[in-house]
Image (cartoon, rainbow, N blue to C red):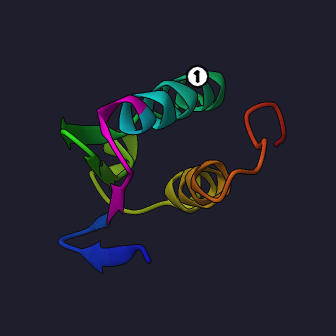
Amino acid sequence: MWKEENNQLKRSFEFANFIEAFGFMTKVAMLAEKMNHHPTWSNTYNKVDITLCTHDEGNTISDKDYKLASAIDGIYKGGNTLFKR
């Protein structure tokens, strides 16, 4: 579940291992590039922490962040949202 905190959307994702976490990050990276909206994130072993905010709108949450968050949720749930808009 995404949390709104300090003008950012934040969520942590957990996986069975590093390979699954890295695969998820790769899918999110391709999606973010397609949407031209890039997350701030970190990865430690099987955990990926993602923070979203729109820098060019004053470092606040925008519709871009909600759209990307929803698409990331789709990837996490196993849906192929990579090429859908």
Q: How many marks?
A: 1
Left or right placement of residue 49 versus residue 27 in this view: left
Q: Badge 1: few (under 14), some or many (20 or more) residues near its Cα, within 10 Å?
A: some
On the image, which quarter does residue 81 sit in?
Answer: top right
Which residue sits at x=62%, y=61%?
A: 70
Which residue sits at x=40%, y=63%?
A: 61
Q: Position of residue 26 (x, y in %)?
A: 49, 24
Residue range (magenta): 11-19
Q: Position of residue 42 (x, y in %)?
A: 20, 39
Asked if residue 4 lies in the magenta stretch, the reply is no
Q: Position of residue 53 (x, y in %)?
A: 35, 52
Which residue sits at x=49%, y=26%?
A: 29
Q: Nearer the viewer, residue 70 or 65?
A: 70
On the image, which quarter does residue 18 sit in?
Answer: top left
Give the quarter of the figure containing the C terminus: top right
Which residue sits at x=57%, y=53%?
A: 76
> As displayed, is residue 38 above or below residue 16?
above
Tag 1: residue type? Met
